[in-house]
Amino acid sequence: MPVAELARRLGVARATVTTRIDRLVASGVIVGFSVRVRDEAELDRIRAIALIEVEGRTTDAVIRRLRGFPEIAALHSTNGGWDLVAELQVDSLAEFDQVLGRIRSIDGVVNSETSLLLSSVLR
């Protein structure tokens, strides 16, 4: 939301909102900002969720390797049958296949299951 809109809704000056945001960034409460685009802007983009099982104590090494993949938009640790959840974004099915192969070839990755995201019904 733009600073001007925040200020209007809160009934304060823009400078007040800006100062508060700057303090939250400086204190580490806000760690970054991102841009969300409309789904229509990414119609041809292939998105998927990859569930990844990691062997024993190799999780940190696997995470370090996965952080270098530009196709991974987000990476989460989790509980249950899977150790990691990766959000993938690629431009083609060929690129998708290559990324899956690279993920599965990482030492310590013992299993994976991937689902393509067809449409977003709530964001």
Image: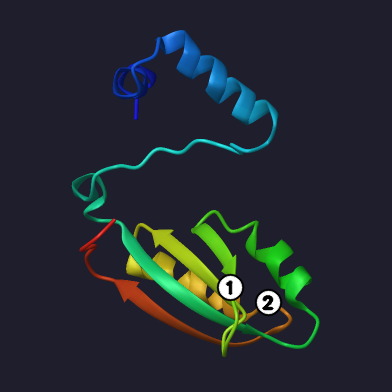
- Residue extending furthest right? 57
Total numbered labels: 2
Amino acid residing under circle 2: Ile
Q: Nearer the viewer, residue 91 or 19?
A: 19
Residue at the image position 61 percent from the left and 39 percent from the top: 31
Image quadrant in which you'd find residue 111 = bottom right
Q: Quadrant of the N terminus?
A: top left
- Cα distance between the residues tagged 1 and 2: 7 Å
10 Å neighbourhood of mark 2: few (<14), some, or many (≥20)? some
Q: Position of residue 86 (x, y in %)?
A: 52, 68
Residue at the image position 59 percent from the left and 76 percent from the top: 78
Residue at the image position 81 percent from the left and 82 percent from the top: 57
Amino acid residing under circle 1: Arg
- Residue extending furthest front? 11
24 over 85 or under it: above or below: above
Image quadrant in which you'd find residue 77 = bottom right
Looking at the rendered structure, the secondary structure element under dot 2 is loop
Q: Nearer the viewer, residue 28 or 77?
A: 28
Looking at the rendered structure, the secondary structure element under dot 1 is helix
| Dot 1 and dot 2 residues touching (CB under 8 Å) | yes
Q: Which residue is mark 1?
A: 102
What label does residue 106 carry, if any?
A: 2
Q: Quadrant of the C terminus?
A: bottom left
9 over 56 or under it: above or below: above
